[in-house]
Amino acid sequence: MYDQKQLFSASLAKDAVWKSGLRSFMEYRDLGVEKATHGDFRAHVIRITKDGPGAHDLHTTGLHAHQCDFQMFFILKGWMRFVYEGQGEHTFHAGDCVVQPASIVHNELECSDDVEVLEIYSPAVHQTVKVDRMPETAAAR
């Protein structure tokens, strides 16, 4: 189990604070999970920025991998299209849930301007690495 007892946490919609983060065209609402789990997990809602840097650019992330133990996202609104190492291209819509295995190479190719996503991963702080090309196993599919 865990070394430390988890803390109670409630993130209320009426108090939501949106901040910039990993992607310039996205903004993030932290849900308080990192503090409550002492850094074991993070959960946030991600949406496309309406104004500001990157707001009107093509919404793509480039090939990358997250060096984490667990990552999943649930599409709350809109749609997103990805390509995955060994899995090819997939388009996900509101109501779809995706588990991205640890360190899988992927790229968000595009998304709707109204997309909102709930993302949960572990640990809360981990490295994201840029990848120059898709591994051969994916290219062969």
Image (cartoon, rainbow, N blue to C red):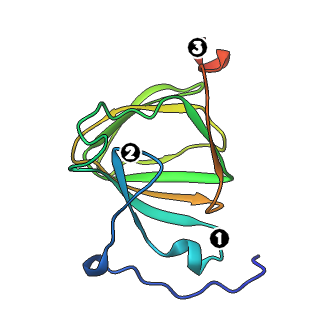
Question: Is 52 in front, or is 65?
Answer: 52
- What amino acid type is highlighted by mark number 2? Ser
Q: Quadrant of residue 136?
A: top right
Secondary structure found at label 1:
loop
Q: What residue lies at 73% left-to-right and 83% top-to-bottom? A: 4
Residue 102's x, y, as percent?
66, 44
Q: Residues within 10 Å of mark 2 (few under 14, many from 20)?
A: some
Q: Nearer the viewer, mark 2 or mark 3?
A: 2
The circle drawn on residue 24 is: 2
Q: CA distance from mark 3 to mark 1?
A: 35 Å
Label at residue 139: 3
- Where disc 2 sits, the SS reads loop
Q: Kindly report which numbered mark, 3 or 1, lies closer to the viewer in this rendering.
A: 1
Q: Residue at x 60, y 11 (%)?
A: 140
Q: Kindly identify which numbered label has been placed on residue 39.
A: 1
Q: Amino acid at mark 1?
A: Gly
Residue lying furthest top: 140
Tell me what residue is drawn at x 33 percent, y 81 percent: 12
- In the picture, the quarter occupied by the N terminus is bottom right
Task: Note whether 28 is above or below 60 in the view shown.
Answer: below
The reply to whether residue 34 is visible in this rendering is yes
Q: Is residue 71 left or right of residue 92?
A: right
- Quadrant in which residue 56 is drawn: top left
